[in-house]
C-alpha cells in the first residue's frame, strides 16, 4: 500500500513539473490527496526522486528574501501569485531580468488559467513529455489548465539561475507549486531547466 501511495505521489509531482519545465508525467487518479511532496527533477529527463512529506500544504510561499520586486522597468509585483526567492534582482542584467520576468508572467498566467497569455509566452510547437515518453502538444496541455483539471494556486521561483547567449537563454530554478492536479491537492518542489528564445524582441518558452 505504501509503495502504491509513493508511486502516485511521484507521478503527480512529475506531471506538475511540466507546467514550468520541459515535461510531464501521466495523469494521476482523481480523488487522491497529497499533503506535501518534494520532487527533484533532472534536467534532461522527467525522473522523480527524493520524496518527503511535511505539513506545509496549502500555505503560500513567503515574500522574496530580497524584498525587491521592481527594477530596470520590470515590476514583478504585477504577479501576486508568484514568489521569487534566493536572488538579488538588482544584480541581474536587463536581458536576464527580461527572461525571469517572462517566466514570472507565465507562472501568473498559469494561476489565472489565462490561456491567451500562456499562448503568447510559449512556442506553438512546444511539447510536453510524459515519463512514459508520451507527448502532449501545447494545446492539449493548456486544455487541462483551462478546464480546471490542473488548478494552480501559487507558484514559487526559488534560486533562479539565468544564462543568456544571444537570442537564446536558459533558466534553472526550483518550482514550488501549490496546486490541485486532478483532485490531488499539494505543494510540490522540483528543479527544472527552462529554455527561451528571443523572437521579435520578446522571450518565449521553446523546446530544448
Image (cartoon, rainbow, N blue to C red):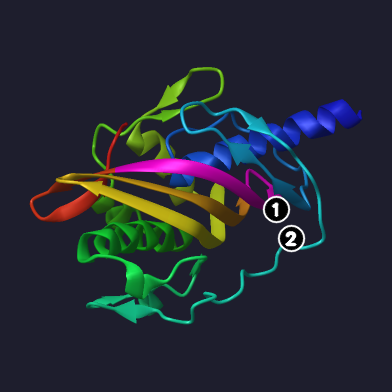
Q: Quadrant of the C terminus?
A: top left
Label of residue 186 in the image: 1
Residue at the spot of label 2: 57
Q: Are marks 1 and 2 in contact (CB under 8 Å)?
A: yes
**Residue at image x 54%, y 44%?**
191
> Is residue 186 a member of the stretch shown in magenta?
yes
The local crowd at label 1, few if under 14, some if 14 to 19, many if 20 or more residues have their Cα within 10 Å, is: many
Quarter of the rendering containing residue 31:
top right
Residue sitting at 81 percent across and 49 percent down? 53
- Does residue 156 show up magenta in the picture? no
Dot 2: element: loop
Which stretch appears magenta? 181-195
* Residue drawn at point x = 42 percent, y = 63 percent: 108
Alpha carbon of mark 1 to alpha carbon of mark 2: how far?
A: 5 Å
Q: Position of residue 179 (x, y in %)?
A: 61, 55
Q: Sequence-wise, which precedes: disc 1 or disc 2? A: 2
Amino acid at each position: 500500500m505504501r509503495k502504491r501511495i509513493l508511486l502516485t505521489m511521484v507521478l503527480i509531482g512529475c506531471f506538475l513539473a511540466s507546467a514550468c519545465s520541459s515535461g510531464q508525467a501521466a495523469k494521476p487518479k482523481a480523488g487522491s490527496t497529497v499533503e506535501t511532496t518534494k520532487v527533484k527533477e533532472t534536467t534532461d529527463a522527467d525522473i522523480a526522486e527524493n520524496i518527503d512529506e511535511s505539513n506545509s500544504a496549502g500555505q503560500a510561499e513567503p515574500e522574496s528574501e530580497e524584498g525587491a520586486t521592481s527594477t530596470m522597468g520590470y515590476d514583478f509585483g504585477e504577479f501576486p501569485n508568484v514568489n521569487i526567492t534566493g536572488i538579488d534582482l538588482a544584480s541581474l542584467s536587463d536581458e536576464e531580468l527580461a527572461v525571469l520576468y517572462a517566466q514570472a508572467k507565465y507562472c501568473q498566467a498559469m494561476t489565472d488559467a489565462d490561456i491567451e497569455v500562456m499562448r503568447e509566452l510559449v512556442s506553438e510547437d512546444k511539447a510536453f513529455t510524459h515519463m512514459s515518453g508520451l507527448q502532449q502538444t501545447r494545446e492539449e496541455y493548456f486544455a487541462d489548465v483551462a478546464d480546471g483539471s490542473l488548478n494552480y494556486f501559487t507558484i514559487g521561483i526559488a534560486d533562479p539561475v539565468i544564462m543568456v547567449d544571444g537570442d537564446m537563454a536558459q533558466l534553472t530554478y526550483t518550482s514550488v507549486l501549490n496546486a490541485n492536479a486532478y483532485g490531488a491537492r499539494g505543494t510540490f518542489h522540483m528543479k527544472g531547466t527552462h529554455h527561451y528564445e528571443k523572437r521579435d524582441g520578446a522571450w518565449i518558452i521553446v523546446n530544448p
